[in-house]
């Protein structure tokens, strides 16, 4: 999943310089950034984003403390110190030198957005307890999918305010981001995750620097999170010949897709923070029900989740351990929980479970049935009034849930979303030909809403939902039967990836691949 947090200007960047850059530990006073990262056993932060050439940076270059201070502390050019010194040496006034180091107007409040990417619990267990080649493969896929999601965000969801009336316009594709990798949570348990800190400085269409319209960007946070989840599970299942199954960690909530064959004891063993948060959430839920006697809405539950996570957060460790030492400690804990034989054969158990699942699932996606189902689900969860981003996120969930790790054909998510808008939704905003509204800002209602001109009856949304699931099952069975009767078609091979340093255990079968570059969507 992906979580989001805004970074305020001024001294907020110091939090990242003291703790985030050294694996969420405590950087000793007076210790250089390079020395602290080496002692903590975490890799150095690196730059990423398509806007790096505009500021003279290279993707993969090491993030320095001065660059963090300039960009995320004051909204200046990352190498502002060098620029100011050069201008002063050339005879410019201090004011002119300072203007040359700025990226557009001064930032007002927020200097960046912190996106935290972390795989689900079953992937964490496989990464922490698997062999070195498996661990490296999971990390490589995790890194590559982060790049895909960031490319999607900087291509489709960047907006800036322009002019005296603050008109929102699409920005040029490209962001400046610093990525920091961590290996454990605050309890010292395995938690592979990356902090990707995006600067709010983006380029306008006239190539001048502007400030990101953060609200429009964060509105697609859930869709980006589902994109990361779906693509990560697809690629891991393809590379290791695995499959996914639904897991229900929280009562009355949607299932979470996890790798099949990974014992639930290991998933819970690694997710110590989630267990504490869920316990506190249950207490807050009970207090709310006793006080109000009202049902718990999605928005109220989200606020309760944030409060429960904050109240159960333990203090950060003063020092971190290198990954080899962490893996040794994790293995001892896992062996004590489920036994050495299970830990040593974790990948084999997952492959055996996947082989059984693949004999019972289909790989054909019925776009029409999926469109009806996601519209019904979204209309129930959002009170009959929703936006494009809600349908897109639900389409990605649908693919993750129904394909069980099998690669989805390129652009399937956007095809489902487009079919839902075309066949089952009507605009909820009055049309204005003089000022057309962007798709991202428009609201929609289902065609079966009481005031819909395209509906003569008004069945309940939950009945539509169940009808959609039945129709989806019928069409999927029919499509699978037709596919079996058709002659075989040679599938397009995926782009070969670099082989691990050590050979992986042989897989029973090899799942078909899909090009990562084919995934990117265009609206």
Image (cartoon, rainbow, N blue to C red):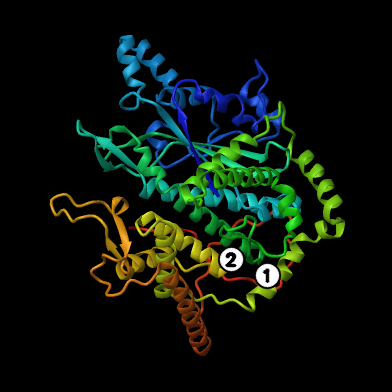
| First in residue order: circle 1 vs circle 2 | 1
Considering only vertical position in the picture, is 435 above or below 521? above
Determine crowd level at label 1: few under 14, some 14-19, many 20+ residues with C-alpha closer than 10 A: many
Cβ–Cβ under 8 Å for marks 1 and 2 = yes
Determine crowd level at label 2: few under 14, some 14-19, many 20+ residues with C-alpha closer than 10 A: many
Callout 1: SS: helix
Name the residue: 34% across, 38% down.
Answer: 213
C-alpha span from label 1 to label 2: 9 Å
Instruction: Decide which of 32, 475 is in the foreground and name it.
Output: 475
Displayed quadrant of residue 311: top right
Q: Where residue 272 sits in the image (x, y, percent)?
A: 71, 44
Q: Is residue 309 left or right of residue 104?
A: right
In the rendered structure, find residue 250 and report the number of the disc placed on it: none
Residue located beneath label 1 in the image: 354
Name the residue: 73% across, 42% down.
Answer: 189
Q: Where residue 204 sits in the image (x, y, percent)?
A: 28, 38
Residue located beneath label 2 in the image: 405
Instruction: Decide which of 494, 344 is in the foreground and name it.
Output: 344
Residue 501 in view: no
Instruction: Decide which of 391, 449 is in the foreground and name it.
Output: 449
Callout 2: SS: loop
Quadrant in the picture for the C terminus: bottom left
Q: Is residue 83 left or right of residue 3?
A: left
Considering only vertical position in the picture, is 147 above or below 48? below
Q: Where residue 127 sits in the image (x, y, percent)?
A: 70, 51
Q: Is residue 519 left or right of residue 449?
A: right
Q: Where residue 205 sits in the image (x, y, percent)?
A: 26, 40
């Amino acid at each position: 999943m992906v979580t989001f947090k805004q970074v305020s200007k001024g001294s907020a960047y110091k939090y990242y310089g003291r703790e985030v850059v050294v694996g969420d530990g405590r950087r000793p006073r007076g210790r250089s950034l390079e020395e602290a990262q080496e002692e903590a056993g975490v890799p150095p932060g690196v730059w990423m984003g398509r806007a790096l050439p505009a500021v003279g940076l290279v993707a993969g270059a090491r993030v320095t403390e001065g660059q963090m201070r300039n960009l995320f502390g004051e909204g200046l050019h990352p190498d502002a110190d060098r620029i100011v010194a050069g201008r002063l040496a050339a005879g410019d006034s201090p004011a002119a030198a300072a203007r040359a180091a700025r990226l557009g107007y001064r930032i007002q409040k927020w200097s960046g957005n912190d996106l935290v990417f972390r795989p689900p619990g079953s992937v964490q267990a496989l990464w922490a307890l698997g062999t070195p080649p498996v661990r490296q493969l999971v990390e490589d896929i995790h890194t590559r999918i982060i790049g895909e999601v960031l490319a999607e965000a900087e291509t489709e969801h960047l907006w800036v305010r322009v002019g005296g009336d603050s008109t929102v316009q699409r920005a040029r594709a490209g962001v400046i981001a610093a990525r920091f990798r961590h290996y454990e949570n605050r309890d010292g348990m395995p938690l592979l995750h990356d902090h990707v800190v995006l600067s709010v400085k983006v380029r306008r269409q006239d190539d001048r620097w502007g400030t990101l319209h953060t609200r429009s960007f964060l509105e697609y946070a859930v869709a980006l999170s589902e994109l990361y989840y779906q693509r990560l599970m697809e690629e891991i299942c393809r590379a290791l010949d695995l499959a996914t199954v639904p897991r229900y960690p929280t009562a009355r909530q949607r299932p979470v897709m996890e790798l099949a064959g990974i014992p639930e004891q290991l998933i819970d063993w690694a997710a110590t923070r989630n267990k504490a948060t869920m316990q506190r959430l249950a207490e807050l839920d009970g207090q709310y029900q006793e006080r109000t006697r009202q049902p718990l809405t999605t928005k109220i539950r989200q606020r309760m989740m944030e409060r429960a996570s904050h109240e159960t957060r333990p203090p950060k460790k003063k020092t971190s351990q290198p990954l080899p030492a962490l893996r040794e400690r994790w293995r001892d804990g896992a062996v004590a929980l489920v036994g050495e034989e299970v830990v040593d054969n974790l990948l084999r158990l997952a492959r055996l479970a996947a082989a059984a699942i693949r004999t019972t699932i289909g790989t054909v996606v019925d776009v029409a049935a999926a469109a009806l189902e996601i519209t019904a689900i979204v209309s129930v969860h959002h009170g009959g009034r929703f936006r494009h981003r809600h349908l897109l996120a639900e389409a990605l969930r649908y693919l993750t849930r129904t394909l069980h790790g099998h690669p989805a054909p390129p652009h399937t998510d956007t095809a489902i979303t487009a079919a839902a808008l075309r066949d089952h939704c009507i605009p909820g905003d009055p049309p204005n030909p003089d000022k057309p509204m962007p798709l991202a800002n428009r609201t929609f209602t289902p065609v079966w809403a009481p005031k819909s001109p395209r509906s003569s009856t008004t069945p309940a949304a939950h009945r539509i939902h169940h009808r959609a699931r039945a129709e989806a099952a019928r069409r999927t069975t029919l499509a699978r039967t037709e596919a079996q009767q058709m002659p075989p078609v040679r599938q397009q091979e995926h782009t070969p990836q670099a082989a691990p340093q050590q050979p992986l255990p042989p897989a029973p079968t090899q799942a078909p691949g899909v090009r990562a570059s084919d995934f990117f969507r265009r609206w």
